[in-house]
Image (cartoon, helix red, strand yellow):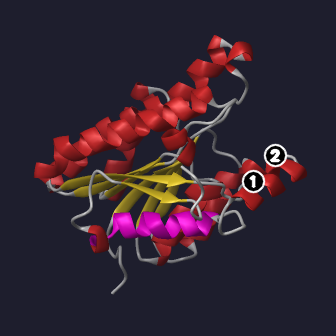
Amino acid sequence: MKLLEGKTAIVTGASRGIGKAIALCFAGEGCNVAFTDLFEDENMKATEAELLAMGVKAKGYASDASNYSDTDRVVNQIVEDFGGVDVLVNNAGITKDTLLMRMSEEQWDAVINVNLKSVFNFTKAAQRSMLKQKGGSIINLSSVVGVSGNAGQSNYSASKAGIIGFTKSIARELGSRGIRSNAIAPGFIITEMTGKIPEDARKAWEESIPMKRGGTPEEVAKVALFLASDLSSYVSGQVISVCGAMKT
């Protein structure tokens, strides 16, 4: 039997990158997948088609993850369409990197709202279904810079550190209801986002990693699969780094 047979997952920000890898990994293990992104574009349609081709129920939803009322609307629609939510993966995120002296209030607010407030929005909306079912797994994508900090990323680091505190609090709050909450802290993962880093900087990053390479979205997805499945039935309130032994 497949690890997520008959379950339904919501994956935010899943039209590309790590979110898409998680959605495809889950579908490969029999999971029905509802996924969100800011716009219903070609990437969303392509991801939806790939998921449907794997023989599961799947649908993409346009959603502003940083807006609570919009999130509530989308989650209610997903519950109506799929019948419930067993797994929530809060993956939506952006970067607006710059030194604090140059950072605008807009750059700070945008990153906090998309990266951190979205986790509050989706968890609050999705917990209703999990509480009814008396079970569920919440998986929040943090980052190694949420653990260690990073110059030029004070907004991003703060948002990802906030996710860790939120994750641990929710694990304590909802544990008695059979709901688990964990975070994944990826290191240097080869995605469209990291693809914008200059070649010499990317090589320097890779050289600083003991495993001497960046990770893949699929390697992050496998950890998410572990946390979504019953293989991790007594794992909650934890932060798992997927970083090739990078210093954190």
Residue 27 x/y as whole percent: 48, 71
Crowd tier of the residue under label 2, counting other residues whose Cα lies within 10 Å: few below 14, some 14–19, many 20 or above: few
- The foreground one among 30 and 93 is 93
Quarter-wise, where is residue 153 in the image? top right
Is there any visible trace of residue 47 in the rendered image?
yes
Which amino acid type is shown beneath numbered disc 2? Lys
Q: Earlier in the sequence, mark 2 or mark 1?
A: 2
Q: Which residue is mark 1?
A: 205
> Would you place residue 46 above or below residue 127 in this image?
below
Which amino acid type is shown beneath numbered disc 1? Trp
Residue 95 x/y as whole percent: 66, 35
Main secondary structure of the magenta stretch: helix
- Residue 226 relative to residue 244: left or right: left
> Would you place residue 71 above or below residue 220 in this image?
above
Q: Callout 2: helix, strand or loop?
A: helix
Q: Which residues are magenta?
A: 217-230
Residue at far left of view: 176
Quarter occupied by the N terminus = bottom left
Q: Which residue is mark 2?
A: 196
Is there any visible trace of residue 122 in the rendered image?
no
Residue 25 x/y as whole percent: 51, 71
Residue 81 image label: none
- Residue 112 relative to residue 162: left or right: right
